Image: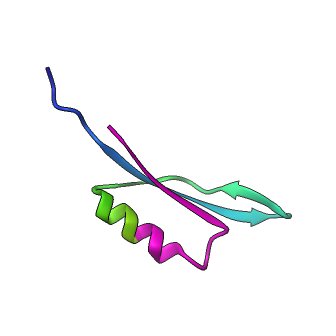
């Protein structure tokens, strides 16, 4: 059996005409990188989701 692979993604949202719109999700190499990317986007985005899946 193969080892489980984990992906880490940051999804940001902006406001367009009063509605939330998802921007292109960004894949990251690690959970730490995803967290740093999400924290860097704070204040400039309507919303941010950082998630991982194995």
Expressed as whole percent of the image width and height from the top left, the position of residue 53 reads 37, 41
Give the side of residue 27 with respect to residue 41, left or right. Answer: left
Q: How many marks?
A: 0
Work out whether 43 lies above or below 12.
below
Question: Quadrant of the image for the N terminus?
Answer: top left
Expressed as whole percent of the image width and height from the top left, the position of residue 37 reads 42, 69
Residue 40 drawn in magenta: yes
Expressed as whole percent of the image width and height from the top left, the position of residue 22 reads 65, 54
Give the side of residue 5 with respect to residue 42, left or right. Answer: left
Point out the stretch of residues depicted in magenta: 37-54
**Residue at the image position 46 percent from the left and 67 percent from the top:** 38
Quadrant position of residue 2: top left
**Residue at the image position 34 percent from the left and 45 percent from the top:** 7
Work out whether 17 lies above or below 9.
below
Give the side of residue 33 with respect to residue 17, left or right. Answer: left
Give the side of residue 26 with respect to residue 7, left or right. Answer: right
Residue at the right extreme of this rendering: 17
Expressed as whole percent of the image width and height from the top left, the position of residue 40 reads 46, 76
Residue at the bottom extreme of this rendering: 43
**Residue at the image position 32 percent from the left and 64 percent from the top:** 33
Identify the image's colour scheme: rainbow, by chain, secondary structure or one colour: rainbow
Question: Quadrant of the image for the C terminus?
Answer: top left
């Amino acid at each position: 059996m193969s080892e489980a692979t984990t992906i880490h993604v940051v999804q940001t949202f902006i406001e367009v005409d009063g509605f939330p719109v998802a921007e292109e999700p960004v894949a990251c190499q690690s959970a730490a990188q995803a967290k740093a990317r999400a924290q860097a986007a704070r204040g400039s985005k309507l919303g941010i989701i950082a998630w991982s899946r194995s």
